[in-house]
Image: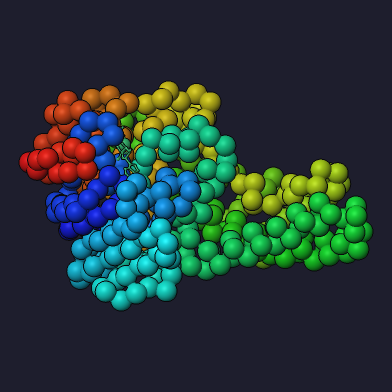
């Protein structure tokens, strides 16, 4: 998969902007606040149908003095050239098009352009709470396994109902009668999630370990293991075999759930344990190690996507270089040797080690130079 051309008008600080890219490494260089991250954001938007950083929705993406914005890309995927477009407006609903045909929803963008993004906040995958690691896991699995996405949506729906029961049963005692049924269905759907997650983490662990070895030039070993409900000793079983274990765990937590009003049992509490050199990275990794580990996980995600679909997702690396030492930087610049890559950075020094790739210099939303 690759983005051959990009056109932006009224998007963030871009006006009437056009660029074409290398099908390998594109280095986006420029001072702070010139629009480097905005450029990656535009590509990500056309892949995912949403921004990775707009907190108040699409209107944030429209240039301050404009009422609408157009994002358009010529991409190559599934063996053909396709055009993807997004029209954003302050007054109308956003519209998405693929090959000039209007799409009914963002889901129809799926598979036309896939992007894996790595940004500075991703260090929280290593350092932050379990929710971020679950999100990483769910994000990959929902893209690759539509049935998983359905099961996850169902699980979350059931969980919401059960939470309401636990919250309101004191005022409406009749609600307690529904608890057993919710628990049964949560166990059934939860078992499906656990089986798929366990299998995926196995693959992720293997590939991330290899990638991390490469990025750190053999200096470090990375392991990823799946932590799920305590009563499950072996998550690599058929879902049917996991259900009794989940019911058992629910039972032992029933009192606590009724007392706290919280759902305490189930795979919505799952986590990944990430270790570097055998010790938990969350507590002990240095800044550069944590960043490298997060990057390894993202690169592994891209490999898995390739193994599954036969195409590498576009890789968007925002500000990845600054905290890495020379060896690791060298890896990022020169040894991610598959598929199309976009790397943003501030300083030409950062990229002096780059042996190939197209360099695009961005100044105030304009392409100042292409080398
Ligand atoms: P850094 O090196 O600091 O990460 P950057 O080149 O990645 O910088 P971006 O985040 O891409 O910078 O762009 C930031 C600039 O875009 C800011 O100056 C901001 O004012 C401008 N900007 C953001 N949103 C809009 C908008 N809706 N309309 C106009 N300009 C915007
Ligand atoms: Mg930036």
Residue visible at 26% across and 41% down? 35
Residue visible at 33% across and 63% down? 87
> Depth check: 290 or 17 in front?
17
Residue visible at 31% across and 57% down? 69
User: In the visual, does 206 lie left or right of 321?
Assistant: right
Q: Residue furthest bottom?
A: 101
Residue visible at 85% across and 48% down? 258
Question: Residue 283, image x and y in percent?
Answer: 53, 26
Question: Residue 193, image x and y in percent?
Answer: 59, 59
User: In the visual, does 228 lie left or right of 50?
Assistant: right
Quadrant of the frame with the C terminus: top left
Where 173 falls versus 258 (above or below)? below
Question: Residue 24, image x and y in percent?
Answer: 17, 50
* Ligand 1 positioned in quadrant: top left
Quadrant of the frame with the N terminus: bottom left
> Depth check: 176 or 334 in front?
176
Where 358 falls versus 180 (above or below)? above
Where 355 falls versus 349 (above or below)? below
Q: Which colour scheme is used?
A: rainbow
Question: Residue 204, image x and y in percent?
Answer: 43, 48
> Is residue 203 at least partly visible in the picture?
no
Please give the count of numbered marks on the rendered protein.
0
Q: Residue furthest left?
A: 371
> Is residue 20 at least partly visible in the picture?
yes
Residue 153 location, quadrant? bottom right
Where 143 falls versus 102 (above or below)? above
User: In the visual, does 240 lie left or right of 174?
Assistant: left
> Depth check: 294 or 117 in front?
117
């Amino acid at each position: 998969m690759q983005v051959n051309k990009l056109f932006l008008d009224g998007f963030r600080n871009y006006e009437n902007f056009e660029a074409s890219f290398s099908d390998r490494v594109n280095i986006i260089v420029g001072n702070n606040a010139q629009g480097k991250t905005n450029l990656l954001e535009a590509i990500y938007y056309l892949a995912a149908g949403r921004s990775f950083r707009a907190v108040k929705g699409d209107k944030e993406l429209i240039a301050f003095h404009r009422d609408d914005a157009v994002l358009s890309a010529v991409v190559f995927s599934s063996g053909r050239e396709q055009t993807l477009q997004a029209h954003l407006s302050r007054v109308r609903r956003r519209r998405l098009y693929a090959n000039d045909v209007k799409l009914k929803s963002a889901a129809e963008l799926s598979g036309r352009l896939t992007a894996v993004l790595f940004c500075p906040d991703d260090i929280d995958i290593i350092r932050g709470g379990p929710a971020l690691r679950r999100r990483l896991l769910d994000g990959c699995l929902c893209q690759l396994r539509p049935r998983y996405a359905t099961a996850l949506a169902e699980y979350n729906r059931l969980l919401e109902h059960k939470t309401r029961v636990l919250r309101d049963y004191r005022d409406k005692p009749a609600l307690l009668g529904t608890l057993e049924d919710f628990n049964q269905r949560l166990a059934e759907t939860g078992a499906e999630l656990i089986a798929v997650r366990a299998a995926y983490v196995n693959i992720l662990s293997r590939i991330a370990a290899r990638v991390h070895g490469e990025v750190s030039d053999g200096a470090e070993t990375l392991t990823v293991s799946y932590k799920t409900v305590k009563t499950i000793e072996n998550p690599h079983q058929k879902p049917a075999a996991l259900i009794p274990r989940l019911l058992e765990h629910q039972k032992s937590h029933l009192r606590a759930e009724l007392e706290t009003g919280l759902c305490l049992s189930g795979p919505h509490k799952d986590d990944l344990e990430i270790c570097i050199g055998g010790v938990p990275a969350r507590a002990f990794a240095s800044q550069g190690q944590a960043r490298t580990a997060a990057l390894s996980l993202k690169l592994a995600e891209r490999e898995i996507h390739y193994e599954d679909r036969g195409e590498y997702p576009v890789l968007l690396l925002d500000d990845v270089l600054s905290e890495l030492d020379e060896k690791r930087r060298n890896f990022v610049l020169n040894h991610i040797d598959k598929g199309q890559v976009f790397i943003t950075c501030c300083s030409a020094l950062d990229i002096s080690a780059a042996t190939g790739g197209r360099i695009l210099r961005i100044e105030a939303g304009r392409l100042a130079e292409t080398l």
